Amino acid sequence: MHIIINLQKLNTAIKNVERIVSKNISLPILNTILIKTEKGGARLSATNLELGLNYWVGAKIEKEGEIAVPARIISSFLSNINDEKITLIAENNTLKISSDYYKTKVLCFDTKDFPIIPKVKRENIIKINSLTLKNGLLSVIDSTLMSETRPELAGIYININGNKIEFAATDSFRLSEKITSIGTNNLKKQFIIPKNTSIEIIRLMDGSEGDVNLTVSDNQIVIFNEDFELISRLVDGHYPDYKKIIPDKTVSVARFNKANFEKNIRTAGIFSSSIYDVKLKVNGEKTEINAQNNDRGELVANIPSELKNKPFEVLLNYNYLLDGLKNIPTENVIMHYTGDGSPLLLKPENQNDYVYLIMPLRS
């Protein structure tokens, strides 16, 4: 292999694919990035056997070929040089890198040992705006289960139904749902994306503009555009019917300025106990936020609020509450109290596309 390539574009590609690279002691080949001439340029590939990423970058090809280069070494080296273009020459499992100011040799691996990243038929393609996909995943990802004891809850549920897409996640203590439009589409698909895959999709969307394409098979998903192709397994299992958990009746409704509410909840969290609890006493035009810790002290804060129907008190995990508030895009947040011991709902003002449910703590 002999190619000449723009350093900045190569660095962008490497930064994207190296996040997929596995830190595997027993299988060193998983610690590498495969660089291969393809489509009149270079394809960079990485996989951890659960997730694979192909990323294409333009290059001048002097000789076709491929090489599996240690990701950490090439990434660290290239991020410390400033040349416009570099030359990559692969010979006998060695990659020679040269530029106007540098020459180096990197010991590499035989590409025959590099795992095959599966190809998924691109059928029933769904187009979705990259920002819509990113925001949908970001809106719910905090509610996924942290452990793999229930794999389906450790992922994000996606339901595509015509021109509507639903994102949902729950860990049994809180639940997030985001519903948005994706344009003309007649397909219906339901699947669960692993949390790690969702994180990589969010990162990829940061550098992506316009639409991306999505294809789902029985157990895999492919997200692609002209620059990249992300292939991941899907979570095997059925997602619980979470909509049954969302209460359809409301006892009281409170309205808060989001920024002020968020700031005071964060401040109260400093004095919360080991279960991260803060108490809200919602009374008419004022809400009292109370937190107490035997080792730190206590805090009582009063903030303006508006209340419809009767006053109420609720004890909440302040971290869960903050996770929900950060995804409210409006100036004001609407809180729905559904009864003693029942879930509390947070919604944006005058919007029905997002709901955050949080279970109260027991006093």
Image: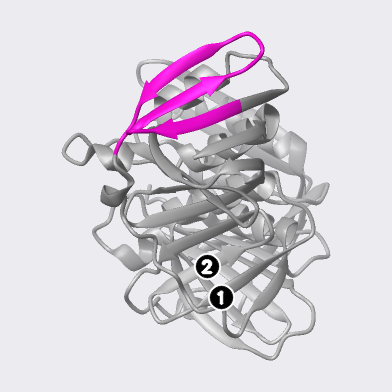
Whether residue 314 is visible to the viewer of this picture, yes or no, is no
Whether tag 2 and tag 1 are in contact, CB under 8 A, the answer is yes
Q: Could you classify mark 1 by the number of other residues whose Cα lies within 10 Å: few (under 14), some (14-19), or many (20 or more)?
A: some
Q: Position of residue 192 (x, y in %)?
A: 44, 70
Q: For the residue marked with disc 2, what is the amino acid?
A: Val
> For residue 344, which quarter of the picture?
bottom right
For the magenta stretch, what is the residue range?
Answer: 87-109
Q: Which structural element holds mark 1?
A: strand
Residue 64 on the magenta segment: no
Asked where in the image residue 307 lies, by quadrant, the reply is bottom right
Residue corresponding to mark 1: 215
Q: Name the residue under label 2.
A: 222
Q: Is residue 58 left or right of residue 315?
A: right
Q: Is mark 2 on a helix, strand or loop?
A: strand
Q: Where residue 80 is drawn, which disc sits there?
A: none
251 versus 363 height, above or below: below
Query: Which residue extends farthest top?
Result: 101
Question: Three-letter amino acid code at disc 1?
Answer: Thr
Q: Earlier in the sequence, mark 2 or mark 1?
A: 1
Q: In this view of the protein, can residue 165 be seen by the observer?
A: yes
Q: Does the magenta stretch include residue 105?
A: yes
Which residue, as the protein is rendered here, is positioned at the far left?
26
Q: Residue at the spot x=42%, y=15% of the render?
A: 296
Callout 2 crowding tier (Cα within 10 Å): few <14, some 14–19, many ≥20: many
